[in-house]
Image (spheres, grey):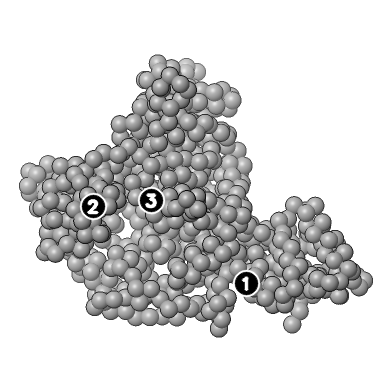
Amino acid sequence: MFLSRICRQAAAKPFFKVTVSGNVKVTAKQSAIPNSGQGKVVTRKFRQHLSEYLRNLADPAIEKELRPLRHDAREAADAVLRLKSEKAAKDTLDKAVDELKERKRRLEEKELELAPVEASFDRTKLDTLLHACHFYRPAFGIYGAFPGLLYLGSNGSKMMANLIGLWEDHFVFEEQMLQITAPHITPQCVLRASGHVDRFADWMVRDVENGEYFRADHFVRDALGKAKIDDETKSALLGRVGNMGRDELWETIQKYSLKSPAGNGVSPPEQANQMFAVQSGFSGETSFLRPETAQGIFVEFNDFLHANKGKMPFAIAQTGTSFRNEVNPKHGLIRTREFQMCEIEHFHDPLDTSHPRFAEVRDSLLNLYTDEAQQIGAAPQLIRLGDAVAKGHISSETIGYYLARTNDYLQKIGIDPQRLRFRQHQRNEMAHYAKECWDAEVFTSYGWIECAGIADRGTYDLGQHSEATNVPLKAERRDPITGTTTSYTPAVIEPSFGMGRIMYALLEHSFRQRAGDELRMFLCLHPEVAPIKCAVLPLASNSEELAKATTTVCRSLHRARIPYTLDDSNGSIGKRYARTDRPGTPFAITVDYETLQRPQTVTVRLALSQQQARVKLDALPAVIRGLIDGSLSLEKAGKILD
């Protein structure tokens, strides 16, 4: 795939050049594609994210220095596991856990000290480009600021539609999945049965002076990082924050006088359900805007099993909007209060976790960050999928299959494979319904962000809804020998994708600047993802003959259903090329005076390489279509221009 290959090569080195304050050793390296920017002063928290990523790229000399610290961390982790298996006293176990955390802290600090910083990225420039090119902006801006609410502009809307369309093609159509479009409004009884009414909540605290809210565990974690307490105590507290209840959170806030970013005190933690409550009808009945699309699938299981003629396993897919009342929405598309999701519920016999297509992906190499690796402070590793399942790192073929397919989808749309990993959830962060979960995490200037999750929900959901309604949600298995049938509650594997986060990560990975021209910022998007596939540029705007030829070109593209934009302004062709490059338009078609001759030809230009070729007008739609799907190279499409 010609252009896709160029984009991947351009992204071969990560894009992070940072100016770091403090006594941190930094070794700078040059990126594969010259990329500028003055750099940004970043927090130590970001450097820790960066260090974690760069561990995969460390050289043997660095690994030699880290090896003893890794050994110490593994030794402490083994001690914790042994004490757990022996059911040791709580005080003894807590002491061993604190020792493990302290050894992990020393390892992470050494990694931070040794990690090189590669290439460059300036988020301010990307934000400027995205706003100027109408990808997304804060919604309702003329009325002020409304955190967590964004609108997608013209290019953003088209790009999101393309990402979802490619997702459907990759999963739904290829796998012959069933599809559903369930209501956004979900009755309270449904979400009470699923556990969301009682458990889908966070503790939050409020700045007592300015009223700003913070998620309590995030507030404590961030405030402890700045608190003047000894490192050993701080390390132990940071390791426990995720498991703290309301009383321990408040005790920690009071004991260490933790303050808000504005320097103010905060209120005691109070529970905040993340769902938006709405009134259904006029009787006062409470419903909720759905926090996920999954529950609308589970409650219709019987209908879809019937539509599938009772055959198991099968999958149901859904795309659409979900809503979560985030305590502190931030970072643009990464944490919003309504967002696009694509979800699959794969129903299978809990006694059979195999997948009929697993052999097709068995040899895939995945960058896995296992629970064990996280406990001992080890780096993620590229592991052959078949080996990961055989060794028990991944519990089933079905989960492994969807991990591989997710990996393929993310790389297909343009996510840099060097900045992609699959992190296994640790036990203390599991959702209430999950038996096993892996997150597809993508490295950005915000650190590692979760973009997709593959969860083993077991029989929890169907069992809960069946119990609440007294309606059996079951399938049947037939004994091949006796011919008898047994009913059972199917288990569920759920791949879930946050499309806004995927879109942002892809935009960041696609950001480029022309060598030698810092002002020439543009996006290098995969042609199938790009909002507009080509720009039509008449060489002159005051020629009737060129205007007619341009109309012919535009109509041929429209008939072929190829999205295009027409720029017939008076600017020079070079300035118009630069303008159409900015939003990631991969191809430009120039209509010039040679187009008026026989045979009629136009110039086709690739945005990234700036390579050009003359192409016959009557072959143009087929050429552009071939360039988009990668079946054709520009060299084969026409005469290359020097």
Q: Residue at x 39, y 54 (%)?
A: 330
In front: label 1 or label 2? 2
Q: Looking at the picture, tell me which residue is in the foreground, 42 or 362.
A: 42
Amino acid found under the numbered disc labelled 1? Leu
Image coordinates for residue 435, horizontal then vertical, percent:
33, 39
Task: Name the residue rendered at 54%, 40% in the picture.
Answer: 319
Determine which of the numbered discs, if any, sits on residue 608 in the image.
1
Mark 3 element type: loop
Q: Nearer the viewer, residue 423 or 28?
A: 28
Q: Which residue is mark 3?
A: 329
Q: Tag 2 or tag 3, which sits nearer the N-term?
A: 2
Q: Which amino acid does the dot numbered 2 rest on? A: Glu
Tell me the crowding category of disc 1: few under 14, some 14 to 19, or many 20 or more residues within 10 angstroms, Cα based. many
x 34%, y 80%: residue: 27
Task: Give 577 or 254, whichever is nearer the viewer.
Answer: 254
Residue with the mark numbered 2: 209
Label 2: which secondary element: loop
Q: Is residue 61 visible?
A: no
- Asked whether the residues under the numbered discs 3 and 1 touch, taking CB atoms below 8 Å apart as contact, a structural biologist would say no
Give the secondary structure at mark 1.
loop
Whether residue 273 is visible: yes
Screen quadrant of the N terminus: bottom right
Instruction: Give the CA separation, mark 1 to mark 2.
Output: 51 Å
- Label 3 sits on what residue type? Pro
Q: How many residues crowd mark 3 within 10 Å: few (<14), some (14–19), many (20+)?
A: some
- Disc with the residue nearer the chain's start (3 vs 1): 3
Q: Is residue 98 left or right of residue 467?
A: left
Q: Position of residue 122 (x, y in %)?
A: 45, 71
The reply, left or right, for residue 388 in relation to residue 315 is left
Which label lies toward us, 3 or 1? 3
